[in-house]
Image (cartoon, rainbow, N blue to C red):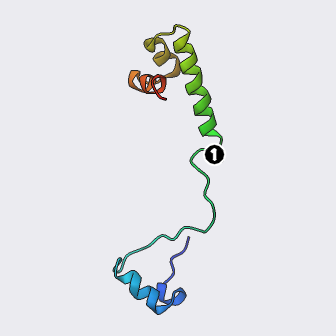
Amino acid sequence: MKYVNAHTVLPERLVEELQNYVQAGYIYIPAAGKKKRWGKRSGYRKELQLRNESIRQRYVSGCTIDELSSQYALSHHAIKKIIYQK
């Protein structure tokens, strides 16, 4: 990403309007287009959903929070959040 002087790419009226909000600072303008949600591209979001479902199933079948915590290397608090999540 390169930096470009606003005066070279934007109309003067737009530059003046932007200066009402930002004086001598940097503004990031993201590329147009639909952005994918976190974890969609890599599949990690789906992995977490499967892991969490497995934790819930194991809890229902009798595993304790202590056991789940050590098996999944998560804190007790994290396991409780997953189990009681709607």
Say which amino acid is labelled 1. Answer: Lys
Rate crowding at label 1 as few (under 14), some (14 to 19) or many (20 or more) other CA atoms within 10 Å: few
Identify which residue is drawn at 60% across, 58% down: 35
Q: How many marks?
A: 1
Q: Position of residue 72 (x, y in %)?
A: 52, 21
Q: Judge whether 73 appears above or below 8 on screen.
A: above
- Left or right: residue 64 versus residue 35 is left
Q: Judge whether 54 appears above or below 9 on screen.
A: above
Q: Residue furthest front?
A: 86
- Left or right: residue 78 versus residue 34 is left
Identify which residue is drawn at 43% across, 27% down: 81
Q: What residue is shown with label 1? A: 40
Q: Position of residue 61 (x, y in %)?
A: 56, 9
Q: Position of residue 75 (x, y in %)?
A: 41, 24
- Label 1 sits on a secondary structure element that is loop
In the depicted view, which residue is nearer to us: 39 or 2?
A: 39
